[in-house]
Amino acid sequence: MNALLTEAERERILAKAALFEPPAAVGADGRRDLVGLTRPELAALMTELGEKPFRAGQLWHWIYHRGETRFERMTSLGKPLAAKLEAGFTVGRPEASDQVSLDGTRKFLFRFRDGQQAETVYIPDREQDRGAVCLSSQVGCTLSCRFCHTGTQRLARNLGVAEIVGQFMGVRDAYGEWPSPQGETPRLLSTIVLMGMGEPLYNYENVAAAMRIVMDNEGIALSRRRITLSTSGVVPMMERAGAELGVNLAVSLHAVTDELRDELVPLNRKYPIAMLMDACRRYPGASNARRITFEYVMLKGVNDSEAEARALVRLLQGIPAKVNLIPFNPWPGSAFEPSSGNAVHRFARIVMEAGYSAPIRTPRGQDILAACGQLKTLSERRQK
């Protein structure tokens, strides 16, 4: 794909994303949500209110480092400013309900101002006091991957910056991890994976703005090395995401031929495997220290043969890569079955003998439909 075509396609993707933009972050009482505003936007707001720009830094500290939602408790602001903020603004969180799996995985259902919903999952590490928060970027999805439950829910809209950041902050509320841990202090919520509902690169502007807030050193302060963005292969946006955000990349591959991937991941018809792998080779920052993760759902009799394992090794040549082998997690109405344990281990052995890490992911949260590929809410497409 030449540079001109890539740029034109990138602009088309961003223009289409604008059609699914979220509603303004304003409550029923007319007050504007401060969550999701950038530092310059907060500074401009302080100027509008007749305050000094340094007040924006104080607000940022209270919102993203302390996790405070009530202005009267933001003691460094002073009572007059707190009163002004209370009159016209909020520090919001989406409404949340949750389920807890037998293995400790916790699934949150977040409800937003317009009634739309998205699911977020916290996956605790069984051996260490930490875990990953799996964030959603859209309500529903357009990709219709055949093995994915989320793909059966039509896209309602993109999530806004406040709604993406708000998921992480809401999970932090639930675990009481405020203020943000500093230095070497262990983090219970140590990692973000953008692997929930939706395709992050089809909502890139909002996802990027949200991750910049998360990575800001004076707030949540989560390192870019602790953030992984997963894409099904939106090739024109991949290099931009790597250059601007520098986060880890995961690619949902799941097949080694275009014929099969066209069926499993319909996006492949637009950006076939050769184009996708070339984009991976160009991904900024990829190295042996920061390998690209290739996600591969193991489907019985579909993509789990030894020949396909060897073909995968050939595809990965020249890419600093590791492979996550994911046992298929069944969901109501799915047409696939998980590969046998023997098939998965044979596949893994071939990949590892070629010099690539190929861990087999242990399914988590299956009993509450919180495992990989199982997320889906009861939200319906918003009608205009």
Image: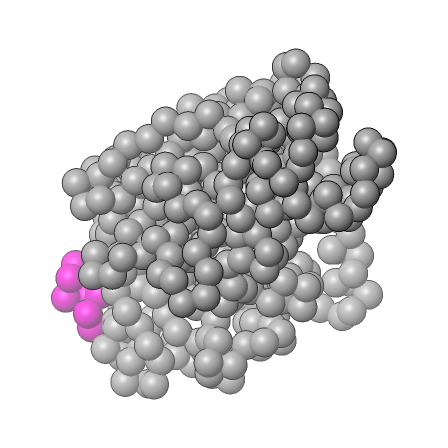
Residue 66 covered by magenta stretch: no
Q: Which residue occupies 17% across, 40% down?
A: 102
Query: In the image shown, does 311 or 201 lie closer to the viewer?
Result: 201
The x and y percentages for residue 221 are 54, 57
Horizontal placement of 324 versus 103: left or right?
right
Q: Residue furthest left?
A: 342
Q: Is residue 365 left or right of residue 224?
A: left
| Left or right: 51, with 109 as reference point | right
Task: Examine the residues drawn in magenta and state their main secondary structure.
Answer: helix
Query: At 50% across and 58% down in the image, what residue appears?
Result: 222
- Left or right: 109 in relation to 238: left
Front residue of this view, candidates 292 and 37:
37
Q: Place residue 299 in its image quadrant.
A: bottom left
Q: Is residue 235 above or below residue 92?
A: below
Quarter containing the N terminus: bottom right
Work out whether residue 196 can be spotted: no
Residue 156 sits above or below residue 359 on the image: above
Q: Nearer the viewer, residue 283 or 278?
A: 283
Q: Nearer the viewer, residue 153 or 37?
A: 37
Residue 126 sits in quarter: bottom left
Task: Return the x and y of residue 79 as percentages of the image width and height.
Answer: 67, 28
Measured as percent of width and height from the top left, residue 363 is found at: 24, 52
Scheme of colours in the image:
one colour
The image quadrant of residue 311 is bottom left
- The correct choice, above or below, for 214 with respect to 273 in the image is above
**Residue 267 drawn at (x, y percent):** 55, 52
The count of marks equals 0
Residue range in magenta is 339-346
Residue at x 16%, y 59% (from the top left corner): 340
Residue 169 in view of the camera: yes
